[in-house]
Each structure stands twice: as C-alpha cells, then as structure tokens.
Amino acid sequence: MYYDLNVPWTADAAEVQRKLSFLAELGYSVVALNHSLSGKLPADITCPIPSPLPISPPATLRILRRLTLTLTDPSQNHRLKALSDPTSNYDLLALRPTDEKTLAQACQSQDCDLISLDLTRRYPFHFKHKTFISALDRGVRIELTYGPALTAPDPAARRNLIMNASAIIRVTRGRGLVFSSEAATALAARGPADVINLAVVWGLTRERGAEAVGSEARAVVVAAAFKRTSYRGVVDVVYGGEKPAKDEPKAPPPPKGKRKAEEPVGAPAQVSKREQKRRAQAARREGGGADGEASTLNTTTVAVGTPKP
C-alpha cells in the first residue's frame, strides 16, 4: 500500500475530485486531505473538510483529514494536545516550523504526528542531527514534500528542494522519512516509483525510499489512530457486541474415559457373551423340571427290564 499524506484541500470540488482520481490511478491507497493554519490556534477549531465528502472519491482510496499548523512563535501554541483528542475532527496533526527555535521545539516537545518543512525556501541555519533524532526517538516522522517545487515558476525553488532534502537525508541518515506530494493540482502528483527515484537522486537508498511512501507513512497513520482511540497508548477500547438477553443453558460436558460407539436408531441392544451365558443357564433351570422327570423315567425302565447276569 502506498500513502500520500499531504493533498491540499480546496473548496473547488472538481479539482479535489481530479486529484483523488489521479492519485488512485497512480497506485495510492491512502490519501490525507490537508487543511493549513498559520499563527495562533483559534478558540474554536472547526475542520472545513466535510464528512462525508461532497464528491465521490474512488472506492479504492481511504480518505483521512489532516491539519498542518505553521509555527511562528513557540509560546503561542500550547493547545496542541486538544487536537489529539478523540473528539477532534482531524486524523493527523503536522507542524511546519519556520525558524531554528520552532524547529527545535517541535522536534523535542510538541505533540504531533509529522514535522513538515517547506523545502522550497532557503533556511538561514544548518540542520542538526541531534534536533531531528529527538523527534525520531519520540516516534515523530519527518515529511518531505516535492509538489510545490515542481510547479513553482522560480527555478530557485527546485534548487532549494534538492539542497534541503539532501541535507535532511544526511542528518537523519535516511531514518523516519515520509514523502508526500502537497500537490496543488493533479499535474504536481507523481507515482510511487517516480518518488522513489527522486529519493535515490537526493541520496536515499531505494529500500528507504520505498519505506518513505509505504511502511513509514503507514506507521504515522496507525500511531495517530492508536493515540486517539486508546488510553495512554496501552488500553484500547473496542466494541465487543451486545450482551444476550438470557444466557442459554450450557451443554453438559462429554463423559470422561473411552467413548462408546453410537448405535443406530431402532437397532436391538447388544448383549455381551457373559449375559448370553447367564440367560441360557436361567432358561435351562426354568425348563429343567419337566425334562428331568422324563429322563429319570426312561432311565428306570431301562434298568428294570435288563436281566442280571
């Protein structure tokens, strides 16, 4: 299964339909529609992505809802845990740092599922191995997006994409990376094989590139769902069905020991040889009176009629 966890949501239903249909043809199975916010979180966070969608997505696609929050001030976003609540309308939460301070805070302490960087811009600081490793140790993945650079009219955006992607791959050593399209239009999306080839060009191995659009992205979705449906990541409450109104009587346990062969219905009961012998002796005793008298008379007559020598 291939994942694209960053497809921008727009109010144009026809454009969203084209992007979802094209991604399904490219071979993706899970797509996350992304809603972006910048600045401080509002008091009432409402998801603009309706449920169900006003369009008819392909039957092979699983649709998720994602929020990407741009971090500009570390002291403004202290309500991020509310977005991880089971009542939240979002399935994924991603943070987009804008400077070195917000990047360090997002990697070290912020509660999120993804850290997504804008690779089309040039950052005035160097990416550090220690900063990204702290995020990977907490189970947070790093997202690399290629779509904005492919459609940007400025060639500097593509140069920055290659430079930033190569630097992140180098400091993370290819671990915990997720590739997404962030395609504003259907033309900016690429198939999984093309994304893997881009990863190889940027310095990632082909196996790691396949994980970035497969198993690593799946781990993000599973961890986010488990975080929202379980208690402290340990106890998961599932629906076990309704309890029956009345308990049915349990069948008696089978008898221990050697089981006897079942006899066909209507067949005569089998009698052991000992029982047959006992019944024969009883029959002889019952009929022995008449037979015994007859044998005695015959014996006496023969004895009287026989002359003595």
Image: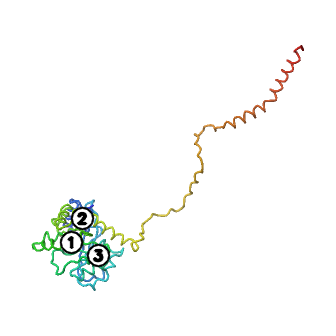
Distance in Å between CA atoms under marks 1 and 3: 15 Å
Q: Is residue 130 above or below residue 20?
A: below
Residue 170 disc label: 1
Lower position in the chain sequence, tag 2 or tag 3: 3
Quadrant where the C terminus sits is top right
Q: Quadrant of residue 292?
A: top right
Residue type, mark 3 in image: Ala
Residue 280 disc label: none
| 281 lies left or right of 97 | right
Q: Position of residue 127 (x, y in %)?
A: 21, 77
Badge 2 element = helix
Q: Position of residue 14 (x, y in %)?
A: 19, 66
Q: Residues within 10 Å of mark 1 (few under 14, many from 20)?
A: some
C-beta proximity under 8 Å, tags 1 and 2: no
Tally of numbered discs: 3
Lower position in the chain sequence, tag 1 or tag 2: 1
Badge 1 element = helix
Residue at the spot 29% in from the left edge and 73% down from the top edge = 136
Residue 289 visible to the viewer? yes
Q: Which residue is mark 3?
A: 135
Residue type, mark 1 in image: Arg
Residue type, mark 2 in image: Arg
Q: Position of residue 229 (x, y in %)?
A: 38, 71
Residue placed most toward the observer, 241 or 3: 3
Badge 3 element = helix
Q: Is residue 68 above or below residue 216?
A: below
Q: Which residue is mark 2?
A: 208
